[in-house]
Amino acid sequence: MATFQSVSSVLQPVKMATRAAMFTFSKFRYFPILKHGVAKFSVSSNLLNASALEPGYSRDPGEVFFKENVQTLLERLTGRDCDKVFHNRKLGERLEPPKYELLTQAEVDHVMAEMEVKLKRKLQMPPLLKERDPIKKIYSFNPELQGFDDSKYVFINISQGITNRNREVVVRDPNGVLREASWEERQRMCQIYFPVPGRKINVPKMFEEGNIQSCLDRDEFEFVLDRACAQFDPDDPEYISVTRKTYDFVDENTKYTSLRPTRHFGPMVLHLVLSKKMDNLLFHFINSKDIDAAANLVRLFHTVADDTSPTEVDEFQLIENYIQGPALKKPALELAWQSFLEIEKQRREVHSQQNNASN
């Protein structure tokens, strides 16, 4: 065991190509954990060629997503469908046969309360955040260590009770620089010592451009988004790239029903509103005669824009005001809206005639 007074101290000439180190306050401890260069890193390819893309939102999505009124609107837009939320998934596990039981009303109420808790948990939306800033903190530079080794030395604090986000991870580069680990190095080391279920040390091949496009072409949107949530943090550039690509593919091909109601529908809606591409979704709601959802979408638009326009007016008037005002695809929306109003007028006339006949 080697002991140092500070992280800026010069490392002893100990070969570390196949070892990792534990950083505990003022001490560094070395011990083997895996072979083949655990502390050695290579630069991975940028997934989807968009790791540094600007999200292109009208404002910081994190400031909007966590607002209570925004969460309420997103939950209403997502809706509830127990059959879809609890549908069988391809997890490679054997399905248990169904069980049938005779229950009293009190037992039924208890089971329904448990199902409500599970439903809320499964519909908990992953946050929509802006891309995190790269880590560039340097502790010291020791030129006397240049050329000592061609491998990086990684030190991680493995103390309990610390979140991976706040865990100390430092790297000694071959050029003598002692710095804070990058996000990629941090995630890899944390995954070695504190593995997150479903997360791999190396990014799965499915997130490469051709493979992910193949998944989207097969309408496996929920599968892609679930894997992205397991593999990346919400502010990871690669997570943002994967989810944006999926959301835009769903929007361009009007595959909204494939994600509704799932936990990913709300973030997709907010993404479309923030990027000013919600008109296709509004058109879909109007054609589906889901006026409640269409009105809530317009309310979300005004909430995100901090607009002072009244949102508690009649749903029909609220939608019409948006189409006549800030809508970007006015002709298509006006045609769909007029068609809906005509059908609704005829439906009400028929209903009125039936009531008069019955009386």
Image (spheres, helix red, strand yellow):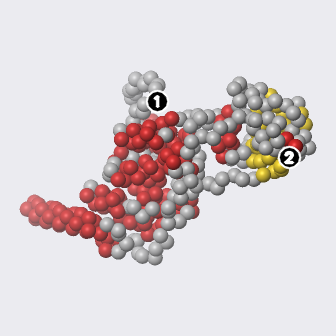
Is residue 7 shown left or right of residue 96?
Answer: right
Q: Position of residue 56 (x, y in %)?
A: 50, 61
Question: Gap between marks 1 and 2, in whole Å?
Answer: 49 Å
Q: What is the quadrant of the C terminus in the image?
A: bottom left
Comparing 9 with 223, the one in front is 9
Residue furthest out toward the left: 357
The residue under label 1 is 91
Disc 1 residue type (three-letter):
Leu
Residue 45 in view: yes
Residue 72 in view: no
Classify 10 Å Cα crowding around label 2: few (below 14), some (14-19), many (20 and above): some
Number of numbered discs overlaid on the protein picture: 2
The residue under label 2 is 142
Residue name at image x 85 percent, y 41 percent: 145
Callout 1: SS: loop
Callout 2: SS: loop
Residue name at image x 46 percent, y 26 percent: 92
Q: Position of residue 177 (x, y in %)?
A: 80, 46
Disc 2 residue type (three-letter):
Asn
Q: What is the quadrant of the N terminus in the image?
A: top right
